[in-house]
């Protein structure tokens, strides 16, 4: 095998982290393989639920091995037999698992499985990761690529929709696979239609270098934090070397579902490439464990601003009390609630989607009733490639002469002097509001 073949193999995506990697820098660029040092095993907090789960289902695994993110990836629950060893599957779940083929496989880290109810198929986290029959039903308006990302792909793996920013798809692997995934068409299928390789990375980097208007790069996938430290270091270093790239973001669910991946070594790599931001995917307050407190603390202590992204999911988090607990809990973990998403119309996702007014209701239930830092922006990622469109509850009542009439979080209406303004002039103000004023 030639050095070039070795180099391509090192950058090809694998289900399991390779034992031979390529160190960023001249050695990597010259194609000389370097055998990485054995991974350093480090301790990591383990909540009471994880302790009991480990003893029950992985009795031969010690605490240090459990805390090894590589072991967690290798031990992911993927098959019907592995699921049934742990969960009491419903008939619907069992038949859906048997039926699956292609992308978006079942994949659940042992840690994340420890947060799920083993007997109740309606458990919120379990519903998001174990398929059911409705996943195979496609209703009008759904599509495999509803956001039109393939249409806006400039070169393989690089989506250029907004003028000054690009979406860089780094890998097709996730540590866990959410059943409502926006990119369900491309993740988890080794050797499928969407492949990820070093040559693809280089093509994307060349495109970014050739377009000086690009100042913001979002790394996503799949999940970038499933890549080895060396690969991340290499990619972040290449991006940092492009003078017009000012802003690098990483979109990831790993700190939530595989928190032990946030090792001290990873943090050292990330700190080299500031300014660096992260958007973390959270779904439910159950995820806010001692392990997640450690992963987010390490990232925040490294100077990485953390924002959250949460998808509204029917019967899982689509009410004000659950969302309030989640958003307030995120602030305790030094994560700023950033986006609250309407569920994308991915094929087979109808079981998860709520009416759009549910998102408005949740924002209205947060605004004024908790700190403003805990209120995310509710958006719809417009089908067909229209981008993110923010939606807010209606707080503008109308006008009364030179006064703008505004409704507050308690339903009271207040005047704001706005002489010469025209906002709200086309609205008919209900008579009772004018009477109260």
Image: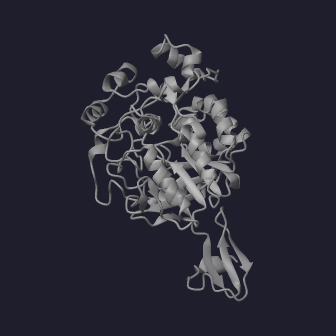
The N terminus: image quadrant: top left
Residue 112 seen in the current view: yes
Residue 212 percent coordinates (x, y):
58, 65
Residue 319 percent coordinates (x, y):
52, 48
Does residue 367 appear left or right of residue 320 in this picture?
Answer: right
As drawn, 408 above or below 83? below
Q: Residue at x 55, y 49 (%)?
A: 309
- The one nearer the camera, 331 or 158, is 158
As drawn, 264 above or below 66? below
Residue located farthest toward the top when viewing the structure as drawn: 60
Q: Residue at x 28, y 34 (%)?
A: 92
The C terminus: image quadrant: bottom right
Residue 166 percent coordinates (x, y):
52, 59
Q: Residue 422, located in which quarter of the rendered image? A: bottom right
Specify how the rendered protein is coloured.
one colour
Does residue 189 appear left or right of residue 333 in this picture?
Answer: left
As drawn, 34 above or below 234? above
């Amino acid at each position: 095998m030639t050095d070039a073949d070795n180099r391509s193999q090192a950058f090809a995506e694998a289900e399991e982290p390779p034992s031979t990697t390529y160190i960023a820098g001249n050695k990597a660029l010259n194609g000389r393989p370097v055998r990485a040092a054995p991974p350093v095993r480090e301790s990591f907090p383990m909540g009471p639920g994880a302790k009991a789960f480990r003893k029950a289902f992985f009795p031969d695994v010690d605490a240090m091995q459990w805390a090894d993110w590589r072991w967690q990836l290798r031990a992911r629950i993927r098959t019907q037999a592995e699921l049934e060893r742990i969960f009491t599957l419903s008939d619907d779940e069992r038949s859906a698992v048997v039926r699956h083929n292609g992308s978006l496989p079942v994949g659940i880290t042992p840690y994340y499985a420890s947060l799920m109810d083993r007997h109740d198929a309606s458990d919120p986290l379990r519903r998001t990761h174990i398929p059911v029959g409705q996943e195979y039903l496609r209703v009008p308006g759904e599509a495999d690529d509803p956001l039109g990302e393939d249409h806006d792909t400039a070169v393989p793996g690089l989506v250029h929709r907004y003028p000054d920013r690009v979406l860089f798809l780094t890998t097709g692997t996730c540590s866990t696979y959410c059943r409502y995934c926006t990119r369900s068409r491309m993740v988890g299928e080794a050797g499928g239609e969407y492949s990820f390789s070093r040559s693809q990375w280089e093509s994307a980097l060349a495109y970014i270098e050739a377009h000086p208007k690009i100042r913001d790069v979002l790394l996503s996938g799949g999940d970038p934090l499933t890549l080895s430290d060396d690969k991340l270091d290499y990619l972040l270093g290449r991006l940092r070397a492009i003078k017009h790239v000012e802003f690098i973001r990483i979109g990831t669910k790993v700190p939530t579902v595989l928190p032990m991946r946030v090792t001290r070594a990873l943090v050292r790599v990330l700190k080299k490439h500031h300014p660096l931001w992260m958007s973390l995917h959270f779904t439910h307050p159950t995820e806010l464990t001692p392990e997640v407190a450690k992963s987010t603390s390490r990232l925040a202590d490294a100077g990485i601003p953390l924002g959250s992204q949460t998808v509204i999911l029917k019967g899982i988090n689509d009410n004000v009390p659950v969302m309030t607990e989640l958003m307030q809990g995120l602030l305790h973990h030094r994560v700023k609630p950033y986006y609250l998403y309407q569920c994308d119309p991915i094929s087979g996702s109808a079981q998860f989607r709520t009416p759009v007014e549910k998102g408005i209701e949740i924002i209205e239930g947060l605004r004024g009733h908790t700190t403003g830092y805990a209120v995310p922006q509710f958006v719809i990622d417009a089908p067909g490639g229209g981008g993110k469109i923010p939606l807010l509850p209606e707080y503008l009542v109308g006008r009364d002469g030179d006064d703008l009439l505004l409704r507050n979080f308690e339903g009271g209406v207040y005047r704001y002097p706005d002489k010469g303004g025209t906002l709200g002039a086309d609205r008919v103000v209900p008579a009772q509001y004018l009477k109260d004023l």
